[in-house]
Amino acid sequence: MKKVVTFGEILLRLSTKVGERIQQSSQLMMHYGGAEANVSVSLANFGLDVFFVSKVPNNPLGQGVERHLKANGVHTDYLIKEGERLGAYYIEAGVGGRSTQVTYDRKHSSFSQMKLDDVDFEAIFDGASLFHVTGITPALSPNMKELTAYSLKKAKEKGVLTSFDFNYRSKLWSQKEAGATLKQFLPYMDICSCGELDALYLLGIPKAKEGMNQTEKLHYYYENIRTQYPNIKSIYSTFREVISASTNTLQGNFYVDGKLYQSKVFHIDHIVDRVGGGDAYAAGILYGILTGMNPEETVTFGTAASALKHTIHGDVNTFSKDEISAFAEQESGKIVR
């Protein structure tokens, strides 16, 4: 069984009922979630040996985090219990043309104050096949930026495949700061999740020529990234059309060996909960890479996983690999040369 290590913050999530705003709600639904933790749960659910590296307070909320992870098959050997608070975020569910709104309450959390001395990545990466982290983690504090850089470099030293999801959050840092930081990380990435806007506004790649369609533009941006950073083996993203808050279409993109593979377009109606859909997609792609699926199978599996996640409450995807494969109907994606 392949060992996977993920590193990031897990949060308490509080959500309104559909049709209610935060300021008028008298009760909120409670879940635990966070980008890297969500990927951890999916990969553990697919049968991989997943270890989550993080820091939570030693109180009932921190204990709830540990129980949540263990219940979903994620190892908590590297879950540090120190500090005073668990970060939180509030979700106001969108309806029709009104988008879902997120409000963070995560400053001075236990995780954001984590230091290099708190964790031994040298030992953690022993026997690991993959290390996954996202752009949310270095955005939290200067020491988290340092820790993320160190962890990526150490993973590469240990011969571990590295995965980085840009996951840009404008509420956490500016495009300028994010771009400068990510450029420092790119030489240590083997796999990355990056969309057209990331390439354009964070990496500063020249704008694609007029007249190109959406797929041709993405291929152009990915070729530019690979030319500048030949260490990157594969890049992935999705195309999403938002028809309404409850109806979207989703198509997966997976670039490897100079070719862009695409899934079929999934029509998602009715969306129960969109949060975590990107993490479900990332986990599906990573699972395909780790288990040797061909590119068409990988992008189809990842997109199907994301589409299914939209049908359940909470951050995490609870579907098995067999359920996802059945949902995808074993349909291969197309290849764009």
Image (cartoon, helix red, strand yellow):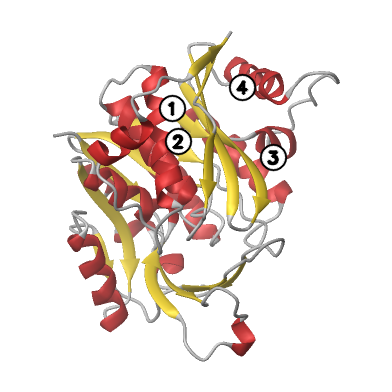
Separation of marks 1 and 3 at Cα, in angstroms = 24 Å
Q: Are marks 1 and 3 in contact (CB under 8 Å)?
A: no
Amino acid carrying mark 3 in the image: Leu
Q: Position of residue 295 (x, y in %)?
A: 41, 18
Q: Are marks 3 and 2 in contact (CB under 8 Å)?
A: no
Report the residue marked by disc 2. 303
Q: Position of residue 102 (x, y in %)?
A: 60, 68
Q: Position of residue 233 (x, y in %)?
A: 45, 20
Separation of marks 3 and 2 at Cα, in angstroms = 24 Å
Report the residue marked by disc 4. 222
Report the residue marked by disc 3. 202
Of the 4 image quadrants, the one containing the N terminus is: top left
Q: Secondary structure at mark 3?
A: helix
Report the residue marked by disc 1. 299
Amino acid carrying mark 2 in the image: Thr
Q: Of callouts 3 and 2, which one flags the residue occurring earlier in the amino acid sequence?
A: 3
Amino acid carrying mark 4 in the image: Tyr
Label 4 Cα crowd, 10 Å radius (few <14 / some 14-19 / many 20+):
many
Q: Secondary structure at mark 1?
A: helix
Whether 87 is drawn above or below 331: the answer is below
Whether 293 is drawn above or below 282: the answer is above
Q: Secondary structure at mark 2?
A: helix
Separation of marks 2 and 1 at Cα, in angstroms = 6 Å
